[in-house]
Amino acid sequence: MHPINLALARRLERLARLLELRGDEAYKIRAYLRAAETLESLPEPITHYAEAGTLTQLPGIGPAIARKIREFLETGEIATLKRVQQEVPVTLLELLNLPGLGPSRVRRLWQELGVVDLDSLEAALRAGRVRGLAGFGAKTEARLLAALERYKARPRGHLLAHALDLARMLLPWLRDIPGVQRAQLAGDARRWVPYPARLDLAVAADRSPEDLLPLLLAHPLLEQGRTEGGRLLLWDFDGFPVVVHLTAEAAFGTFWLYLTGSPAHVQALEREAAARGLGLSPEGLHTGEGLRTVAEEEDVYQALGLPWIPPELRQGRDELDLARAGRLDDVLPWEAVQADLHMHSDWSDGAASLREMVQAAWESGLRVVAITDHSPVQKVARGLSVSRLRQQRREIEALRREFEGRIHILHGAEVDILEDGTLDYPDDVLEWLDLVVASPHLHLDQDAETATARLVRAVMHPRVRILGHPRGKMWPRRPGLPVDIRKVAEAAAAHGTALELNANPYRLDLGEEDLAVVREVGAWVSINTDAHSPQDFGYRLFGIALARRARLSARQVVNAWPTEGLLAWVRGEEPTEAPLV
DNA sequence: GCCGTTTTCGGCCCGACTGTTTTCAGTCG
């Protein structure tokens, strides 16, 4: 995605949300959101279409939005947005993250009680003022207080995907600035920490922070910034912090290493250095003869008798031992995943045809895919009736012939796990499908005991091969089912069912703590993208990174199995290897 | 606000659930 397209899409999205809070017509809101989606999927920078005079030929962009786009390209601002931002407090947008609060209720809290942010909402709730509003009662008050508590306890930080998108757009730009010799991703995001607090960039340059600041602020994604010591603190349009750390090129290796962390990993390296009579600091290696600067990270590790350790493994756990023993490859290799067993097409709520999805999967390096559209209970997602499911098989058979010898296509379904743990298709249909991914979508407010029993029942169904996004969590809004993962994993291990690591960056479900339990129990894991459009296959990296952080082996991840073994397991045959219990 | 026609304006994804109603609005997926 081009930075200018993203910068503009963000503004249109914010405009839509603010208009929604103001109470403008719903279809106008949708129009802005659709235009933002179009911008995010454009192959060329929007300037290209503006210059060619073809803006209104783009889907969802008519005369009014085209005018705003041209205004933004010429002035860097959208007057309508500025005006609406003065009218509606931007801080209200965060309230929409609370389950139970939609635009209409937030508007009334704001207009009738003067609530503008989380703090004033909490104060109003605790003072009993909310339940005085028409349509709000004691139950709503209690639910909102509970939602507020859960929200405050959510994983802090921002979406990793957001940080990496930003880095992808900023780094090439930084490297082109005169005087900048190197620019690299560092910090939590480089280690694939799911919710980084900020984006850290390591930059080697022979210019001062004060010289660089105005150049960086010219970037369309960066809104404001200042210098602080040897660093530049910057913020993007949504207030996401970007920190540019400056060093000299000769010391880049140690500097980058320290900036990447984790602190526990770096401390382990310092102890390793001390054991060899060396000192390690961001400035370099301290030897008996004085300071030796190190420009490359590999050389730091080499000086300590270690191979380079990939950032996502730098957790201060067992990685130094693994590295010393030459066993870093015991952890699932990045390139080992060649199957994706959960994706959607425009038969249900996907954005692309079956053919486009299979083609994109093939191009992204996959060799086995499963088409898994929704089951009937998912009305909004246009879940497939049994007869449409049977029609879909004919199209899939044609695609199999077309892609013969290149990619193996399974015809599955993402079948809803109903409230009691039964499934949303009858058994004969489940029997007929190549692969059943069973997932919870509804009734995500169950208590731990009910939810655990529900998932265990689904996992034990003889036709279920994969338990999709087991908790049903969605960042930042939905915390997910309070399931006893150990019990679910034990049932899964006993039945040869895999638990999904859903790689969609908004889900990452199972999460890191859950995966540690699953690893210990020895149940199989399936890393899938849940792709709803061709570009979503890129989500795979988030899943693999998380699996690596959890130290899963290729043996435990079904998507990394050789094709024949994987297909045998999908068919429900006895696994060739016993589960790792 | 956009779109596709009926070329001037009506339709735009929909059904269930919940709490708060006393016939429904708001939220969710």
Image (tube, coloured by chain):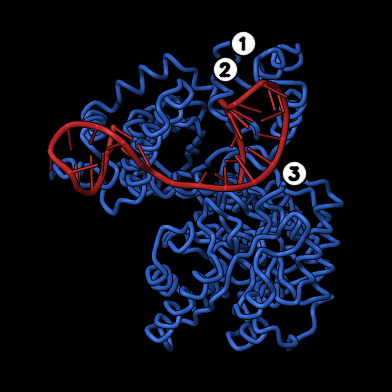
Chain colours: A blue, B red
Label 1 residue SS: helix
Q: Quadrant of the C terminus of chain A?
A: bottom right
- Dot 3 and dot 1 within a common chain: yes
C-alpha distance separating marks 1 and 2: 7 Å
Determine crowd level at label 2: few under 14, some 14-19, many 20+ residues with C-alpha closer than 10 A: some
Residue under the point 58% across and 60% down: A376
Sequence-wise, the earlier of marks 2 and 3 is 2
- Dot 1 and dot 2 within a common chain: yes
- Tell me: residue A19, above or below residue A151: above
Task: Look at the image and tell me whether residue A547 can be seen.
Answer: no
Question: Where residue A341 appears, x then y in whole percent?
Answer: 57, 71
Label 2 residue SS: helix
Question: Where residue A317 appears, x then y in whole percent?
Answer: 76, 58
Question: Where residue A456 appears, x then y in whole percent?
Answer: 81, 64
Residue under the point 42% across and 31% down: A26
Residues marked 3 and 1 touching at CB (< 8 Å): no
The answer to which of A25 and A404 lies nearer the viewer is: A25
Residue A445 - label: 3
Dot 3: chain letter: A
The answer to which of A410 and A9 lies nearer the viewer is: A410
- Tell me: residue A328, above or below residue B6: below
The answer to which of A388 and A236 lies nearer the viewer is: A388
Residue A108 - label: 2
